[in-house]
Amino acid sequence: MIKRLLLPLLLSAPLLLASTHTTAQDQPKEVVYYGFDPDIVTNYISGNRRSLGYIRVTVELMLEDKAFLPAIEHHEPLILDIIIGIFTKQPEDKIKSLTGREEIRLAILEKLQQTMKKEAGETMIRDILFTKYLYQ
């Protein structure tokens, strides 16, 4: 009688352990945002070529997982350099138009993802957001 009760229990124990192990790995990742302080202020190519235009942007990075925060903090100077470098190469009409702003955002996102893949082994950055976008 006891053998009949113990046998199914012993046979099902590895299945229970395996099922609890896979659910721990399948937990959803926690998306977090990383912002830069202070705002990014840089210049861009003005239309008349005699003066420079200025732009002030607040950028937030949407990260795939909370575990990527230390790597993002470590690579912050590189990330800022990429963002500033892309803005300074943009013409005035692209800076001031909504479609141009979106093109710039996508260019920055693509370059950051490529760079983080190269530097840290993962893209890490899901998206970027401009929460403040002022130009003069």
Image (spheres, rainbow, N blue to C red):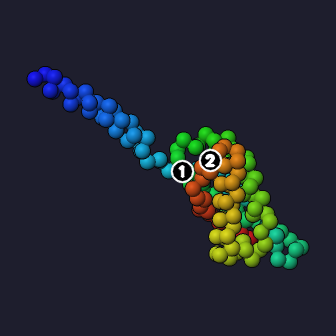
CB under 8 Å between discs 2 and 1? yes
Identity of the residue furthest to the left in this view: 1
Residue 64: image tag: 1
For image coordinates 14% across by 26% down, the residue present is 4
Q: For the residue labelled by badge 2, is the local secondary structure a helix, a strand or a loop?
A: loop
Relative height, residue 47 to residue 23 (above, below): below
For image coordinates 67% across by 60% down, the residue present is 110
- Considering depth in this image, is 123 or 38 the residue closer to the camera? 123
User: Quarter holding the C terminus?
Assistant: bottom right
Q: Where is residue 87 shown, x and y percent of the image? A: 75, 63
Seen in the image, is 20 located left or right of residue 97? left
For image coordinates 88% across by 74% down, the residue present is 49
Q: Which residue is mark 2?
A: 122
Q: For the residue labelled by badge 1, is the local secondary structure a helix, a strand or a loop?
A: loop
Q: Where is residue 94 shown, x and y percent of the image? A: 73, 74
Q: Quadrant of residue 108?
A: bottom right
Identity of the residue furthest to the top in this view: 2
User: Quarter holding the N terminus?
Assistant: top left
**Disc 2/disc 1 C-alpha distance (Å):** 10 Å
Q: Earlier in the sequence, mark 2 or mark 1?
A: 1
